[in-house]
Image: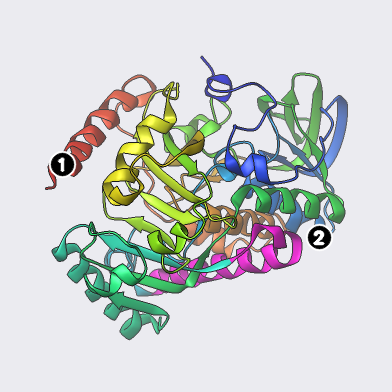
Amino acid sequence: MRLLYANGKRGEHAASWYAASAEAPGPYPMLKGEVRADVAVVGGGFTGLSAALHLARAGAKVVLVEAQRVGWGASGRNGGQVAPGLNMHQDALEAKLGRAAAEGYWRIGLEAVSLVRSLVEELAPEADWQPGVLHSFWQESEAQEAAGYAAFLRREYGHETQEVLDATTVRGFVASEAYKGGVVDWTAGHIHPLAYAFGLARGAEAAGADLHEMSEVHRIAPEGGKVLVATDRGRVLADQVILGCNGYMEGLAPKAQARVMPINNYVVATEPLGDRAAEVMPKNVAVADSKFVINYFRLSGDGRLIFGGGESYGYRFPADIAAKVRKPLEQVFPQLRGVKITHGWGGTLGITVKRVPLFIRVAPGVMAAGGYSGHGVALATKAGQIMARAVGGDAGDFDLMARLPAPPFPGGPLLRTPITTAAMMWYAMRDRLGV
């Protein structure tokens, strides 16, 4: 079974609230025949669309091919959070790679947020940038540790836009007894991710990029001093290739695929809550909590609660996504017990062993990025820009990101899924036990 076709209908966006509330561009034509390009971009999510946009604006001839529709994968299905930094904290990065490198990662993380915000304002105002991402904590010890890390960032990196909340003040943001504290970052924000992806596609097309949908890539290989990108009915001969496939690499780049594992995550949208929206979320921030199987949520522009929770590690999504996500939703918000859920959908993201993004040269003239591990809105957008710059000869940030530790998953192609699943199930059980 191909992951690309394991869930839903080919060529159709997931039946999400995002797809129901955003106007899709295109459709863009299937690639047919042979075309030449300076750069072929594989993948029509944030990574590929950002790369195509920045390359086209720099004057390159760009051909982007997408197996489904632009924004079809994780880029159009996620929680919409846009936050700085990596999953690996700055002090850990300093210890592993040195202060200078850690400062570079922090700079890139801040630039990523700024880039998304500027592109939303320019290309997709309907994506509705809203400031603030709150990290909330189930345990008091977690809240204390986070407060210490916020102080570290303020002292060592001059990051002054975080607000530390205790068990009382956090309820001014989230009307739930679940959380013992939190840290809200006002540099961060949240958006309608599919509307943003559509805006990137329109922007890339306007800049001169040639976009093709329903054009799955089957082979990437050297040919006559170029790189061949072969689809069902077409061929691109390019000087260089950028892979933005994340969890959907499936044989295109084994060196990268070994380092990025796809996992499924699930999201629901409630009916519009009306006046209850402000009672559930007194402040319009996005929230991500401290469960290993993370809960994340925010309000939509029309007052729905968009709530993500629950994971799985096989190919197929559960038959009743709403039922799967309702349990953690009602655990956080018991006052919403029985609320009508109008949309439920799944998405497949990519993670790495260390939960830091993968930047890698997989072959001469072929580079890839992925494995954003839940930070993809900001990091994937920035990755596209970084790889576009690398194509143009400025590879400093690409090489810095390539230093991040992203080893292959243990067990190889056959065993990595069961090994990783067993480990994740252990941590999920700890969540349920509250330890």
Secondary element type, mark 2: helix
Secondary element type, mark 1: helix
Compared across the picture, whether 241 is left or right of 134 comes to right
Q: Where's residue 109, x and y in %?
A: 49, 66
Image position of 115 with respect to 80: above or below: below
Q: Provide the residue span drawn in magenta.
A: 100-129
| Along the line of sight, the residue nearer the viewer: 256 or 19 | 19
| Along the line of sight, the residue nearer the viewer: 143 or 284 | 284
Near mark 1 (Cα within 10 A), the count class, few <14, some 14-19 or many ≥20, is: some
Q: State which tag comes first along the sequence, 1 or 2.
A: 2
Give the numbered dot on residue 430: 1
Q: Is residue 408 visible?
A: no
Q: Is residue 190 visible?
A: yes
Camera-side mark, 1 or 2: 1
| Residue at (59% x, 59% y) in the render | 382
Compared across the picture, whether 187 is left or right of 86 comes to right
The amino acid on which the numbered mark 2 sits, given as a three-letter code, is: Arg
Q: Where's residue 136, x and y in %?
A: 30, 62
Image position of 145 with respect to 337: above or below: below
Alpha-carbon span between mark 1 and mark 2:
48 Å
Give the numbered dot on residue 373: none
Compared across the picture, whether 310 is left or right of 106 comes to left
Callouts 1 and 2 close, C-beta under 8 Å: no
Snapshot quadrant of residue 32: top right
Circle 2 sits on which residue? 57
Specify whether residue 84 is painted magenta. Answer: no
Is the stretch drawn in magenta largely helix, strand or loop? helix
| Residue at (33% x, 27% y) in the render | 416
The amino acid on which the numbered mark 1 sits, given as a three-letter code, is: Arg
